Amino acid sequence: MTALAQLPHLRRAVLVPVAAASLLASGVGIGIAVSAVAADDPAPVVVTRQPLAQVDAPPGAPHRTLGLSKVVVMPGAELASHHHPGEQLGYVAEGVLTYTVETGSAKVMKGSGEDPTLVTKVKPGDTVKVRPGQWLVEEQGEVHHATNRGTVPVVIYLSTLFRTGAPSAIFD
């Protein structure tokens, strides 16, 4: 019989640290393997759009889809020039969105929907910073682009009223 078999407390004292070291080492190995695989992946997605709710043909709007989405724009990400095939409201919940109108116009609002206050009207060539608690009113066809120049993600909740079947954005 070995010394470890004769002394159970010694066996536990030796085996527990050895097992912990083994698990730690395997975790480090897995982390290195994941990092190596991740390094070979294409560039990360920096803008995501998550549909939250939608209804087709709401009362008063036949042939339209009313939608609610969440968009996350990571730091440094840019939204290329585009327009929308209908009306869109964009509420900035987190971060600061740098927003530029190319053609048409948009409004930056603040306050509740029941008692909104106009912050500014954005005309072609104007660039504004849309801050948390402010929201954009984008008219159909207004061409714009935006970026996140900050260090935290920009979170935007979008309410859209588009023709049923139309894309959420049309790139220009």
Image (tube, rainbow, N blue to C red):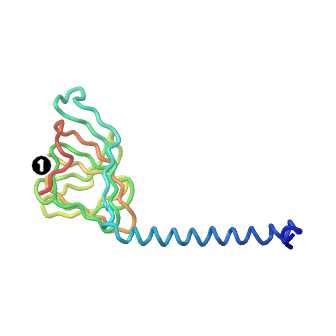
Left or right of 156 on screen, residue 137: left
- Residue at (25%, 36%) from the top-left corner? 66
Q: Quadrant of the N terminus?
A: bottom right
Residue 171: percent from the left, percent from the top? Answer: 14, 55
The part of the image, by quadrant, that contains residue 147 is bottom left
Residue 79: percent from the left, percent from the top? Answer: 23, 60
- Residue at (75%, 69%) from the top-left corner? 15
Residue 84: percent from the left, percent from the top? Answer: 17, 48
Q: Above or below — where is 42 with respect to 119?
A: below
**Nearer to me, 130 or 58:** 58
Neighbour class for label 1 at 10 Å: few (<14), some, many (≥20)?
some
Residue 127: percent from the left, percent from the top? Answer: 21, 64
Where does label 1 land, which residue? 141
Q: Quadrant of the C terminus?
A: bottom left
**Nearer to me, 50 or 137:** 50
Left or right of 106 on screen, residue 36: right
Type of amino acid at the residue the image marks with label 1: Gly
- Residue at (25%, 53%) from the top-left corner? 108
Q: Secondary structure at mark 1?
A: loop
Left or right of 33 on screen, residue 96: left
Left or right of 84 on screen, residue 74: right
Q: Above or below — where is 88 with respect to 46?
A: above
